[in-house]
Amino acid sequence: MKHDSSGFTLIETAIVLVVIGLLLGATIKGQELINDSREKRLIGDFENIPVSIQTYQDKFRALPGDDARLAMHLPGAIPCSPLAAGKCAPGNGLIDGKWSDTSDASESYVFWQHIRLAGLADGSLDTNSSDYIPRNVLGGQLGVTSISPIIGLSGTFLICSDAIPGKYVKRLDADLDDGNTAQGFMRAVDAGTTTPENPIQITNINENSTYLVCMKV
């Protein structure tokens, strides 16, 4: 009598293993491409925002957000108000206000409307809109300021990008600075840091944690 055999032959098993290997390889490669794309967009924020600022300076001889002749340069633009030291002092050559400010009382907040009205960036012109504040590719808030949230990091202005996972922080610093997040032009602190009251600069980056990354320009 003949009996039907069951199960896979060695050849069939080998084919299945090859297919699984190809699928795993494609998945890993796909994730690498996603990570590379996100990193490039994060890098783009740190590179493109300074270009917008410098272009505005070349055109109007002023910093966006700090433009004392804003009404002449961009009719209809909202100036920071009320006047206040450290938040709103048009013409002093600084982008006053915290990187994370969320009202037009700060130059760092109206900054975004000014570069958009000047045609130097995309985004909502409505300062009361829920999508007015720009976000990085990972959803973290972007900010520009002359008031550093990190003690020891200072410049005419700083670009800050929040809620960046550690694996990207390492790559950003290696690509844009010296690879050490506790020194140089780019530094990292705990995500959400807004003032120098929490200035701990992170050296040992945890890939599973998120950070605020700021770079001086």
Image: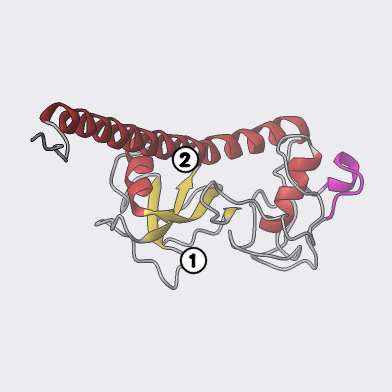
For disc 2, the marked residue is 38
Q: Which residue is drawn at the image coordinates 41% and 71% (left, top)? A: 198
Q: Return the residue nearer the eye: 191 or 10.
A: 10
The picture quadrant where one finds residue 72 is top right
Question: The residue under label 2 is which amino acid type?
Answer: Arg
10 Å crowding of disc 1: few (<14), some (14-19), many (20+): some
11 vs 33, nearest the viewer: 11
Q: Tell me if residue 73 comes above or below residue 112 in the rendering.
A: above
- Label 2, label 1: how far apart the Cα atoms are: 20 Å
**Where is residue 161 shown, x and y percent of the image?**
51, 52
According to the picture, the residue beneath numbered tag 1 turns out to be 192
Relative placement, left or right, of 34 versus 18 is right
Residue pushed farthest front?
A: 1
How many residues crowd mark 2 within 10 Å: few (<14), some (14–19), many (20+)?
some
Residue 53, quarter of the rendered image: top right
Residue at (49% x, 42% y) in the render: 42
